[in-house]
């Protein structure tokens, strides 16, 4: 299948940005004690450092859905596509709970298991595989219904102890489930809201097959329309997000409040603003400088390889940081979800250093990603379909 450059470029950009969030999450001086979008404590610089990385997961998930559509169109074989999606979906679930979870926490005892973006894509692949006989339009309508309506769930009057709430909560909302002694299972990315995004991405896959001038015009219209709808619904301040915006101490912080939409789960407004920006990025992706295209495509062609590798690299750098800050190995804490950083001891680095390390991480991973992308393009081994 001929690769779509705009997909690889935009996916590469968000993979690069994703590393910024994970460097901040593991290494910033306040990351284990404060929420970076909490307006009472966060600086505008920290807020926007976190906010810009909101683009990563929804775009990653959306483009995964679009890639499924393009693959099916190329093969024209529902049965083999279904089998591949089911196998790859279950593989991604296993990968998340093992290799990725260890990369996040470096906890050999797996005291914390967390479901995040890789598992949400895996779940989406499984459900897509089961629904491939439906038209892409029908799947798109289901995706839109999920995105626009799942924010209704919190206002449905259900008792805290009701069976329905107990069943629905892990599907629609972040949930912490204790299991075994001193172990928890965290559903950070509840599957249904993210399923809406991958469904929508699948339905929009045919956009990428349009002639360039039509495709660009469509991306611009959809992107601008989504952002205008975001501004309108957010300004009304009644529906679309769990948190309403409020007037703050000055205009800048009021703007931050306006932009502070919920990722957990991805609200309607979160989807509108992030996917709206994505469509604008897709519209201009193949018009930016060729050097930028070439650089970002390297990461966009091997997203899963990069994702796993960058987490291990960043976590190793985190441990080096702790040693350089005088924390002995015996005081590292891996079982409490703080990435090895001991609670009660000031560790971490300031924001400007986070940016420097982020750039370092991205540049160091360029060669491995380039090598693997070339290897994948020139080899036809069965296991390459799963990485």
Image (cartoon, helix red, strand yellow):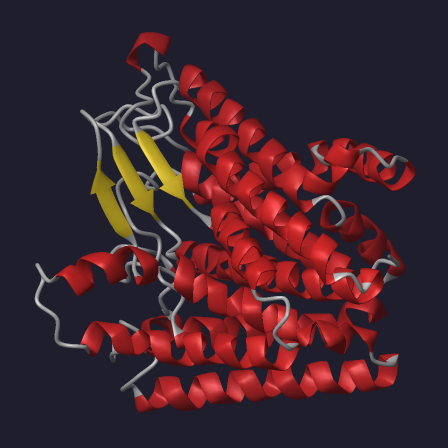
Residue 288 visible? The answer is: no
Q: Quadrant of residue 33?
A: top left
Residue sitting at x 26%, y 51% = 175
Q: Quadrant of the N terminus?
A: bottom right
Picture coordinates of residue 242 (x, y %)? 27, 72
Q: Quadrant of residue 313?
A: top right
- Vertical placement of residue 295 versus 73, above or below: above
**Looking at the image, which residue sits at the far front?**
79
Q: Is residue 161 left or right of residue 123?
A: left
- How many numbered badges does the structure rendering display? 0
**Looking at the image, which residue sits at the far right?**
378
Picture coordinates of residue 185 (x, y %)? 29, 39
- Vertical placement of residue 165 versus 27, above or below: below
- Vertical placement of residue 16 versus 374, above or below: below
Give 353 or 279, whichever is nearer the viewer.
Answer: 279
Give 298 or 38, whichever is nearer the viewer.
Answer: 298
Give 238 or 83, whichever is nearer the viewer.
Answer: 83
Q: Quadrant of the C terminus?
A: top right
Give 159 or 3, whichever is nearer the viewer.
Answer: 159
Picture coordinates of residue 204 (x, y %)? 66, 75
Picture coordinates of residue 298 (x, y %)? 79, 46
Residue sitting at x 21%, y 27% = 180
Residue 333 visible? The answer is: yes
Q: Quadrant of residue 282?
A: bottom right
Q: Is residue 300 left or right of residue 223?
A: right
Residue sitting at x 54%, y 54% = 126
Residue sitting at x 72%, y 62% = 78
């Amino acid at each position: 299948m001929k690769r779509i450059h705009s997909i690889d470029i935009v996916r590469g950009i968000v993979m690069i940005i994703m590393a910024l969030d994970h460097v901040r999450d593991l290494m910033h001086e306040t990351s284990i004690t404060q929420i970076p979008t909490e307006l009472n404590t966060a600086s505008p610089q920290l807020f926007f450092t976190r906010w810009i990385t909101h683009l990563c997961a929804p775009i990653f998930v959306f483009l995964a859905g679009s890639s499924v559509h393009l693959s099916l169109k190329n093969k024209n074989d529902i049965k083999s596509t279904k089998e591949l999606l089911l196998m790859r979906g279950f593989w991604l679930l296993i990968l998340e709970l093992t290799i990725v979870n260890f990369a996040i926490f470096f906890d050999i005892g797996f005291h914390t298991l967390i479901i995040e973006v890789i598992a949400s894509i895996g779940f989406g692949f499984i459900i897509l595989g089961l629904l491939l006989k439906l038209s892409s339009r029908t799947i798109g309508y289901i995706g839109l219904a999920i995105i626009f309506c799942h924010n209704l769930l919190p206002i449905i009057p259900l008792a805290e102890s009701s069976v329905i709430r107990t069943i629905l909560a892990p599907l629609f909302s972040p949930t912490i489930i204790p299991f075994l002694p001193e172990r928890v299972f965290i559903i950070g990315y509840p599957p249904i809201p993210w399923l809406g995004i991958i469904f929508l991405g699948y339905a929009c896959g045919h956009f990428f097959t349009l002639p360039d001038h039509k495709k660009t015009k469509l991306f611009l219209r959809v992107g601008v329309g989504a952002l205008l709808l975001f501004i309108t619904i957010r300004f009304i301040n009644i529906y679309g997000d769990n948190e309403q915006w409020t007037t703050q101490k000055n205009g800048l912080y009021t703007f931050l409040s306006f932009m502070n939409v919920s990722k957990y789960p991805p609200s309607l407004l979160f989807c509108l603003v992030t996917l709206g920006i994505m469509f604008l990025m897709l519209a201009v992706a193949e018009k930016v400088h060729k050097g930028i295209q070439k650089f970002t495509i390297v990461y966009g062609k091997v997203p899963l390889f990069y994702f796993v590798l960058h987490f291990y690299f960043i976590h190793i750098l985190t441990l080096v940081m702790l040693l350089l800050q005088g924390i002995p190995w015996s005081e590292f804490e891996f079982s409490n979800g703080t990435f090895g950083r001991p609670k009660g001891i000031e560790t971490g680095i300031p924001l400007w250093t986070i940016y420097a390390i982020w750039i370092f991480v991205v540049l160091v991973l360029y060669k491995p990603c380039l090598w693997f992308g070339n290897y994948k393009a020139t080899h036809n081994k069965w296991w390459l379909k799963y990485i």
